[in-house]
Amino acid sequence: MTEPPVSRFPVPDLAALPDDIRARIEAVQDKAGFVPNVFFTLAHRPDEFRAFFAYHDALMEKDGGLSLAEREMIVVATSAANQCQYCVIAHGAILRVRAKDPLIADQLAANYRKADITPRQKAMLDFALKVSGPAWAVNEADFAALEGHGFTREDAWDIAAIAAFFGLSNRMANVTEMRPNAEFYTLGR
Amino acid sequence: MTEPPVSRFPVPDLAALPDDIRARIEAVQDKAGFVPNVFFTLAHRPDEFRAFFAYHDALMEKDGGLSLAEREMIVVATSAANQCQYCVIAHGAILRVRAKDPLIADQLAANYRKADITPRQKAMLDFALKVSGPAWAVNEADFAALEGHGFTREDAWDIAAIAAFFGLSNRMANVTEMRPNAEFYTLGR
Amino acid sequence: MTEPPVSRFPVPDLAALPDDIRARIEAVQDKAGFVPNVFFTLAHRPDEFRAFFAYHDALMEKDGGLSLAEREMIVVATSAANQCQYCVIAHGAILRVRAKDPLIADQLAANYRKADITPRQKAMLDFALKVSGPAWAVNEADFAALEGHGFTREDAWDIAAIAAFFGLSNRMANVTEMRPNAEFYTLGR
Amino acid sequence: MTEPPVSRFPVPDLAALPDDIRARIEAVQDKAGFVPNVFFTLAHRPDEFRAFFAYHDALMEKDGGLSLAEREMIVVATSAANQCQYCVIAHGAILRVRAKDPLIADQLAANYRKADITPRQKAMLDFALKVSGPAWAVNEADFAALEGHGFTREDAWDIAAIAAFFGLSNRMANVTEMRPNAEFYTLGR
Amino acid sequence: MTEPPVSRFPVPDLAALPDDIRARIEAVQDKAGFVPNVFFTLAHRPDEFRAFFAYHDALMEKDGGLSLAEREMIVVATSAANQCQYCVIAHGAILRVRAKDPLIADQLAANYRKADITPRQKAMLDFALKVSGPAWAVNEADFAALEGHGFTREDAWDIAAIAAFFGLSNRMANVTEMRPNAEFYTLGR
Amino acid sequence: MTEPPVSRFPVPDLAALPDDIRARIEAVQDKAGFVPNVFFTLAHRPDEFRAFFAYHDALMEKDGGLSLAEREMIVVATSAANQCQYCVIAHGAILRVRAKDPLIADQLAANYRKADITPRQKAMLDFALKVSGPAWAVNEADFAALEGHGFTREDAWDIAAIAAFFGLSNRMANVTEMRPNAEFYTLGR
């Protein structure tokens, strides 16, 4: 069987990309040793690529009450609910690396309620899943529940924004049939 | 009754904002005569503000197979499904102005299947609603249905990306309890 | 574009209607200045017309613990959940008039949980939405919640009966593709 | 165990009821040998009682393309979907009598798709269940499917109106906890 | 009308069955006076037949905190939620016999929340329905609720296992279109 | 952190188990090098243990139109829909081994519609997921779709029975909080 395509849409040639996008992709290549397919898929639309990664970086690589591993937990749990193959597999790998835990990602993807995480982290994911799903029903009681576990209002924004942003990402990955790189499956195991 | 707040989160003072953000807000003020509350609400997080509006502009103010009014139809119909008060009311106003039709927004918000739009526009919204909801089930038949109405694959990306982006926007508006400005209710009627 | 029809079913000629139905329609015309399309649509079946409006009047124009505006709030919120274009637009207009509030109807139609209403009114709508949806699960706790906001058992019947009656109305409007009159869109704004 | 009450709400004394309501109840008593509890439950609100039974009679006791047994099939199948104990049990009995079939009601209540009915009757119930549930999505294809089985547009109205009216009835029965009379359980077996 | 078939799949001849299976069927025949169709339907696959009835007996005919009638209540309520005609009708009959109550089965099948059962039995069915549906969300609070009504952890296993096993049974009955014997409809009334 | 328990219920000592159960567990230990926790968890109830594994073997280790790997595909895809951590992780491992494909299990668990499988296998999983979910709606069209891909009616029974049996298994695993052995996470990668 020939390798299935990276995306249902055209994937641009690296050389033909605008300089800033090519530079970002090459930096990832240097650091990770391969280029995750989300970069090639979204490069089909340079302006959307720039906005997407600016948003991603603003949410995933900042300081705050959530650790980097906890941010990835939100991505894996909400992406599983959205049945996004790319994000579950790619961010599952990142989560294993960041949490230094080879089991956590598969547990969260199957059922976060039964995963080896703390009650505080379960409360974080309860909120993330509500934002990812029936966000219209989010109310004061949800914020109070977070506060009961020591999260601040700024943490609540972070959780919500990560769930919301990856809801966008999940939808684009499902529509483009974005294919996870083979490298992700074994990373951090 | 005192006016309810613009957002559940702190709203920054215009003077205290970074120059680029203040400039963008002042430009909107000059053009529209008022500042939509989404600008104040998201300015609480300058980096996210920049990414959000860069994404917005990349999707909503470009050329392509969809008219500007059709782009707003997608926003109104998917935001209604997500029960997003801010987006239904604010983008309903923009849709009335762009479509030069005082009735269209209320019809779409209630039930797009019964609105005074073309079969082609209903097919566009069928796809947008699927992306906004069970995007995991999007398949070749959905693309074929769009093509049957003359939409290209690039149009399909546009529809999907708008639905996905406003899914993010709807979730942030519901979590922040972003309040629509009173001006929107009567604009374009 | 020619005006779409009032109903998917035949609409009778006013002159051909039984006297009592014609009289009722003329009275509405005199008072409102136009005849809401629900009268023409349902007049296709005179016996059902009579029962429908007798039921309507028994619920909507009586004294009791709910104000006339609150009764219309129930109609707008449950009709939005049932995606009934006619009822959302027509009763949204009546609600604006009765509540003397130009913003309330659009807020309730989008997401009643975020509307500018009192906690007591939110409890009323929580119950109405449960009756409109999973009424099989209504239980003692629901009645207790209403009582906690000062509603009597008779008020509970009123709320339930309005939600149930407009569930019928919403279904008939969706099946007949009943078209809201253009007058409703601007009434009370 | 003492007999549970007929209704969660007060049940009026027969002697204290308005003449027309008492006469209707006595007529039922004479014909059936007992008074179905729906009469006592709704008599708590005389005006609603009158409108309810006028609507009922307009839909259930008329001529047309649907037999009386088929009308009861719609009631049983939609009431089962709405988990209405009173209507499933009371109208199940009426269906057994009208269809002269002791098995049909239990089959329809459990799963109408597997019942011993004709393909035409299954199409009728497919439409009734759609009206009872997601009526907002009813479209031309639904009417065409009915016509493919020989139903007229007037039959479609009948099916829809019965499903819509018993949706109201199911909701009132669930809210009032209306209790089916013991007589219904064995009638027509 | 000729009698519809017992199963969508081939039904073996009693004489051709392995001795142990024929013996079990004959024992049922001797005791009940007829052979429930589930025996003929599953005998199409002797190994699955043996495992199915071994599982059934392990759950339904053992001692423990649940009475035999309560075990059948679980079957009827979960089978109704799974729209399984065979199990609702056949186990409804067994429930009437075991509970010595001619009304209980029809009440539970329509809406167990409104049936004439004890609060303890409602708590048992709340748990059974959660296991039959969203079992992934079962948590400590569910076990605590059962304990509040005097159920042990072993009782909780019994309730869960019966709900889970009949979920299997309901699915096989719906796929095979297993037909309830006419005898079940009147048994125990 | 101490290792979380294998099950929420008591786990028997191997030495204390009945001979046949101990023998089965030791045989698995010899073959796999470890004892999957499902054996310890279910051994709490010896009769249910015997019926469970008899059922399992009757479905999973027989000849027929489905390969052993395809049987495991059904397990992984339906267990993912039921959010069963144990089955997704344990049977994901078995699937990788049987399909000699290190990527297939993670793809199927996230979204089988996007996995690298054949159209015939997708049709198999479409049917399995319908049986696992709304089995009440299975109809002739589902069997015809399977036949269009070359499946026999006996294959259809196999697919349905595997989906139904693992629906039982998923429910027991979620209720017992059955913990996947660490060995499964890396097997076959």
Image (spheres, coloured by chain):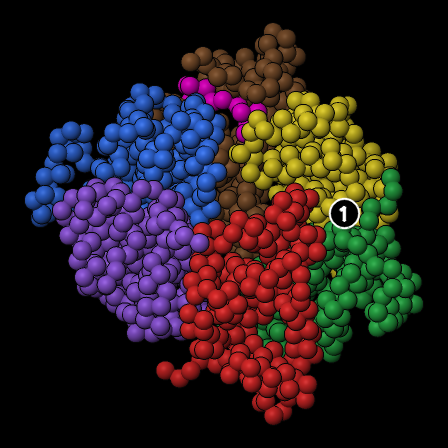
Chain colours: A brown, B yellow, C green, D red, E purple, F blue
Q: Nearer the viewer, residue C13 or B29?
A: C13
Please tell me how many numbered marks the rendered image carries. 1
Determine the residue positioned at 43% across, 36% down. Answer: F143
Q: Nearer the viewer, residue E71 or B25?
A: E71
Span highlighted in magenta in the image: A172-184
Where's residue C86, x and y in %? 76, 55
Residue C179 visible within the image: yes
The image quadrant of residue A170 is: top right
For the C terminus of chain F, the image quarter is top left
Instruction: Tell which residue pokes out farthest to the front in this image.
Output: E1
Determine the residue positioned at 29% across, 45% down. Answer: E11
Where's residue A52, x and y in %? 61, 27
Residue A176 within the magenta-colored segment of the rendering: yes
The image quadrant of residue E58 is: bottom left
**Amino acid under disc 1:** Gln
Q: Within 10 angstroms of label 1, few (less than 14), some, or many (20 or more) residues?
A: many
The image quadrant of residue C118 is: bottom right
Residue B41 visible within the image: no
Residue A123 within the magenta-colored segment of the rendering: no
Q: Nearer the viewer, residue B89 or F135?
A: F135
Secondary element at tag 1? helix
Chain for disc number 1? B
Identify the residue position indicated by label 1 in the image.
B107
For the N terminus of chain F, the image quarter is top left
Most frequent secondary structure within the magenta stretch: helix
Instruction: Tell which residue pokes out farthest to the bottom in this image.
Output: D15
Where's residue C129, x and y in %? 61, 61
Viewed as shown, does residue A68 lie left or right of D38?
left
Where's residue F124, x and y in %? 41, 32
